[in-house]
Image (cartoon, helix red, strand yellow):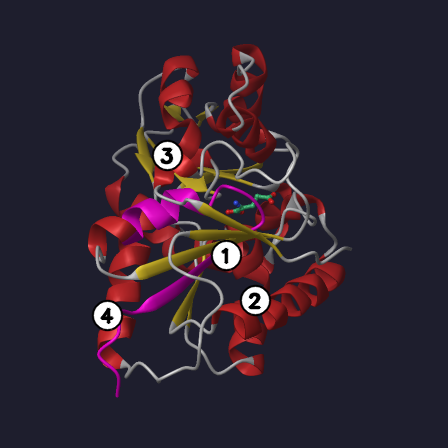
């Protein structure tokens, strides 16, 4: 067993996993966090399932060779609801997934109506439907696959202005009345969405409780790291606070805006084209 710091790989298609990385830093301040974004494959919400599983496995194989983490946090609902089982079968490292927080939403609603905002991929998944049937069978659930919400979050992180009307159009389908009642809880079923929380609160037709699963994911990661011994590993090329992208960033060889504010300061390009 080694006494070195735990090394966590956070994985997403883009910057959405930063909402999870933030919670991990709060929960595990001493851990080394390395962030990988499959920017070549973004957005995952639009992929066909079979192709996306293949893509995730391919990218993960390269990332594990590069990073050799003690634990991988899939900071992406679209990937987790599809590929978590396959990843666990294929690789030995422990995986923590991010899935829509339907169970806590069903426990918190007072009106009995909950909204679930997710990518089109996550909204279509059997996994998501099973969560609803298992935990929210007594609720009315407005599940919406928002076509552009993750991209709007990327726009914000890149420093550009957000179109408020477009934002409202993306979230409005969960703000409908059902049987005289309206949603009082909205699940943020994509890790990009907490990055837009302030703007969504401003344009939302009425106030709701927004549920971000990130703190629960961070607690789960901490307990997994406590359970497992950290295997000694050889020399490591990738050090803490590195961001790995699978394609060249838009501006030269620079760390895209948004990562620096989250404590990441190094960039590594692992070109993994489609
Ligand atoms: N951040 C991702 C999620 O939690 C996916 C966004 C995308 O690539 O479409 O679902």
The earlier-in-sequence mark between 4 and 3 is 4
Tell me residue 130's x, y (percent).
Answer: 50, 60
First along the sequence among labels 1 and 4: 1
Viewer-proximal residue among 37 and 248: 248
Mark 2 neighbour class, 10 Å CA radius: few under 14, some 14 to 19, many 20 or more: some
Mark 4 vs 2: CB contact within 8 A: no
Residue 187: x %, y % from top left: 40, 40
| Residue hosting label 2 | 63
When asked about the image quadrant of residue 177, the answer is top left
Q: Quadrant of the image for the C terminus? A: bottom right
Marks 1 and 3 sit apart, C-alpha to C-alpha, by 18 Å
x, y percent for residue 258: 45, 33
Question: Which residue occupies the foreground of this view, 197 or 33?
Answer: 33
Between label 1 and label 4, give the one nearer the viewer: 1
Marks 1/2: CA–CA distance: 9 Å
In terms of depth relative to the viewer, which is nearer, 254 or 79? 254
In the shown orientation, is residue 266 left or right of residue 8? right
Tell me, yes or no, whether the two marked residues, 1 and 2, touch with CB atoms within 8 Å. yes
In the image, which residues are magenta? Answer: 1-24
Sequence-wise first label, 1 or 2: 1
Label 1: how many Cα within 10 Å (few below 14, some 14–19, many 20+): many
Give coordinates of residue 104: x percent, y percent: 29, 49
State the residue in front, 247 or 154.
247
The nearer-to-camera label among 1 and 3 is 3
The residue that mark 3 highlights is 261
Residue occupied by mark 4: 223
Mark toward the start of the polypeptide (1 vs 3): 1
Point out the frontmost of discs 1 and 2.
Answer: 2
């Amino acid at each position: 067993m080694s006494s070195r710091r735990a090394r966590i790989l956070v994985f997403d298609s883009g910057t959405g996993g930063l909402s999870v990385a933030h919670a991990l830093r709060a929960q595990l301040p001493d851990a080394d966090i390395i962030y990988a974004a499959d920017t070549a494959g973004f957005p995952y919400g639009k992929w066909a399932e079979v192709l996306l599983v293949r893509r995730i496995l391919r990218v993960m194989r390269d990332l594990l060779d590069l990073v050799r983490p003690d634990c991988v946090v899939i900071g992406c609902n679209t990937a987790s609801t599809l590929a978590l089982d396959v990843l666990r079968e294929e690789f030995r490292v422990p995986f923590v997934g991010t899935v829509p927080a339907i169970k806590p939403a069903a426990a918190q609603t007072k009106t009995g109506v909950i909204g679930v905002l997710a990518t089109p991929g996550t909204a279509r998944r059997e996994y998501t439907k099973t969560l609803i049937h298992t935990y929210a069978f007594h609720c009315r659930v407005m599940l919406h696959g928002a076509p552009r919400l993750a991209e709007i979050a990327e726009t914000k992180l890149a420093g550009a202005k957000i179109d408020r009307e477009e934002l409202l159009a993306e979230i409005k389908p969960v703000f409908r009345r059902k049987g005289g009642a309206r949603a009082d809880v909205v699940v943020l079923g994509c890790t990009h969405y907490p990055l837009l929380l302030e703007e969504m609160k401003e344009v939302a037709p009425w106030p709701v409780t927004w549920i971000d699963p990130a703190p629960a994911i961070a607690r789960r990661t901490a307990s997994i790291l406590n359970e497992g011994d950290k295997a000694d590993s050889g020399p490591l090329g990738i050090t803490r606070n590195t961001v790995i992208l699978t394609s060249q960033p838009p501006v030269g060889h620079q760390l895209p805006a948004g990562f620096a504010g989250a404590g990441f300061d190094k960039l590594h390009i692992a070109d993994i084209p489609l």
